[in-house]
Image (cartoon, rainbow, N blue to C red):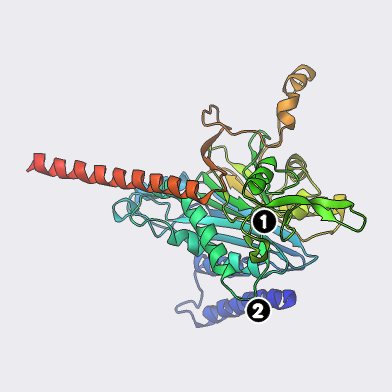
Amino acid sequence: MRDGSRGRGMSSSSSAAAHHHQHRRQGGGSGLVPLAALIKEEARTERRACAGGGGGTRICARDEDAGGSGVGGEPAEEEARRQRPLLRYGCAAQSKKGEDFFLLRTDCPRPSTSASSSAASPHQTFAVFAVLDGHNGNAAAIYTRDNLLNHVLSAMPRGLSREEWLHALPQALVAGFVKTDKEFQSKAGQTSGTTATFVIIDGWTITVASVGDSRCILDAQGGTVSLLTVDHRLEENVEERERVTASGGEVGRLSVVGGAEIGPLRCWPGGLCLSRSIGDIDVGEFIVPIPYVKQVKLSNAGGRLIIASDGIWDALSSEAAAKSCRGLPAELAAKQVVKEALRTRGLKDDTTCIVVDIIPPGQTIRPPSPPKKMNKLKSLIFRKKAKEPSQKLTKQHSGADAVEEIFEEGSAMLSESVSMMWALLLSASTLLLFTASLWTLALVLFF
């Protein structure tokens, strides 16, 4: 299966090259195709080849605009387009079991933008990056890779402006995860499961939804590393253990002959080490698909995302992964993180890493700068803060390198998530009605 998947990607590239050659021979006039057309076709081909996973060693990279809408347009649109960041990404993977998959897309259209705001907003597309680490087979990971985005978009209300769309996105992600899980579990004979770390980048806004123990970290300018996900491992997550036991589940280690207990904490029945996943129909109702969701907005200083499966995080801490690839462009950074994890622990599991650099407009392509050196007195004062891997992002921010936290919700209770979703939709509807009322009043006064 892995060789077949890789072969199809190579065939696609070869076909595209032949297509380009044919156009060069058949073009009118001088027989040459504009360079922009060739680059655009090659970008589409590479994106198709990169959206996958499975096995072997895989490396791919690309430069894209974050939330662009093509080339051309009115001067106002061009000015706004110049203010959005550039995305440069790379992906590297080493396979042991063939159960890691990933998704790389930078040209996803936003179908719910209202007609009234579409002309004024140049951000008509967004980017998606995802890592899916399957277990008990790869069917759940493949299904999630192929269907989760569509389910998220189908949960979005229509006729929203870009700001309203971003506001509704966290709860659409919750709905999309739940629908993906439900539809996959309806497939007869499918008992596999998967983690999912799903990242949507729209301009400077990053929205992350995750279940399981794949992780996404943000290495902001200045060297501050922050977690954008929460690991749903029962061994490490006290809140998830309490949730499972309060719901009637049992948490314990594997018992062997003689009564000894070995290995990590697991949820019984089923014996899964995770408390949240997609799939896993055979482990009971205590394992839920409700994702932890966080939405942040970067300053115009940009930053770097590292999205990876537990093959990376079992070998490297968040800080070690970020530090290992500073000073490298995204495509080499992803390869370096995988290399460092293998050097530290060896190839004990599928190992996948995506690195995304969010680069300020008008700057040369460069990764986040390393942290500034501190003198001994300052290092003593700030040592504890610097070592905290899950440093809390704050809504109140100042300075060019700050990150604003917009939304965070980690509840595993679907009723709470649905209540929040209705609140968001009602607020969006209220805003639309209020805007319509203002227009009506203006027309009445004018005429």
The one of 445 and 326 positioned closer to us in this rendering: 445
Return the x and y of residue 57 as percentages of the image width and height: 77, 65
Of the image marks 1 and 2, the number of the one nearer the N terminus: 2
Quadrant where the image shows the C terminus: top left
Percent position (x, y) of residue 372? Answer: 71, 29
Is residue 213 visible to the viewer in this orientation of the structure? Answer: no
> Where does label 1 land, which residue?
90
Task: Residue 294: tell me if it is visible.
Answer: yes
| Quarter of the image where one finds residue 45 | bottom right
Seen at 45% across and 50% down, the residue is 418
Residue 177, position in %: x, y? 54, 58
SS at mark 2?
A: helix
Q: Give the residue number, with chain letter if any, for mark 2.
A: 11
11 horizontally vs 325: left or right:
left
| Residue situated in front as seen by the camera: 85 or 423 | 423
Left or right of 427 on screen, residue 138: right
Question: What is the crowding at mark 1: few (fewer than 14 residues within 10 Å), some, or many (at least 20)?
Answer: many
Eyeballing the image, is 112 above or below 397?
A: below
Q: Residue furthest top?
A: 377
Q: Is residue 161 left or right of residue 105?
A: left
Q: Residue at x 43, y 52 (%)?
A: 123
Distance between the Cα atoms at labels 1 and 2?
21 Å
Amino acid at dot 1? Gly
Which amino acid lies under the numbered mark 2 shown in the image of this protein? Answer: Ser
Q: Are marks 1 and 2 in contact (CB under 8 Å)?
A: no
Residue at position x 25%, y 42% in the image = 434
Tag shown at residue 184: none
Q: Please name the residue shown 58% across and 74% down the image.
A: 187
For the N terminus, the image quarter is bottom right
